[in-house]
């Protein structure tokens, strides 16, 4: 499975940004798709995840500002980031787990998001 993320960039505090990720190289609908982020000097953390059945999970820090969505037919996942804050700055990674019965997973290459104050 290959993941191609796009949409990162520089945005002002309070603004919006949309990240997109496309999974290719597999004929199955990805069971779980997610976005992680890693801020400078910090560990990588889960931002949001979404199963193929529509069950979502969000980090407390973004739950009322970000929205994750996906297109199961295309194996794409988006992250709509609203009312961004400087603390949202980091490298955002797309992650997928293809099936529920196997634990293997894949990471995308990361896209930089920088929020200016």
Image: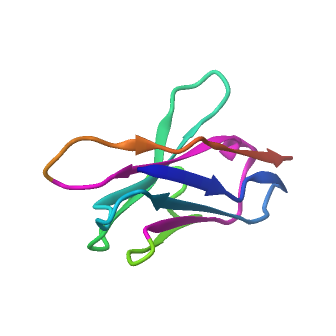
Farthest top residue in view? 41
Query: Which stretch did the figure color magenta?
Result: 75-100
**In x, y percent, where is residue 56?**
35, 65
Residue 60 in view: no
Q: Quadrant of residue 18?
A: bottom right
**In x, y percent, where is residue 34?**
43, 54
**In x, y percent, where is residue 95?**
44, 48
Q: Does 59 appear above or below 79? A: above
Q: Does 93 appear above or below 71? A: above
- Is residue 62 or residue 106 the one in the foreground? 106
Residue at 61 percent across and 42 percent down: it is: 110
The figure's colour scheme reads: rainbow
- Does 5 lie within the magenta span? no
Q: Quadrant of residue 29?
A: bottom left
- Is residue 57 or residue 77 the one in the foreground? 77
Determine whether, in the image, residue 39 is placed left or right of residue 61: right
The mark total stands at: 0
- Does 85 lie within the magenta span? yes
Residue at 45 percent across and 74 percent down: it is: 74
Residue at 17 percent across and 46 percent down: it is: 102
**In x, y percent, where is residue 101?**
13, 51
Residue 45 in view: yes
């Amino acid at each position: 499975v290959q993941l191609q993320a796009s949409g990162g960039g520089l945005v002002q505090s309070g603004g919006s940004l949309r990240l997109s990720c496309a999974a290719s190289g597999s004929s199955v609908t990805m069971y779980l798709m997610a976005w992680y982020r890693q801020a400078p000097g910090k560990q990588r953390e889960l931002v949001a995840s979404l199963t193929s059945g529509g069950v979502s999970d969000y980090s407390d820090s973004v739950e009322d500002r970000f929205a994750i969505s996906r297109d199961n037919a295309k194996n794409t996942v988006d992250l709509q980031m609203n009312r961004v804050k400087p603390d949202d700055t980091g490298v955002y990674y797309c992650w997928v787990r293809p099936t529920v019965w196997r634990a293997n997973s894949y990471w995308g290459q990361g896209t930089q998001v920088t929020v200016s104050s």
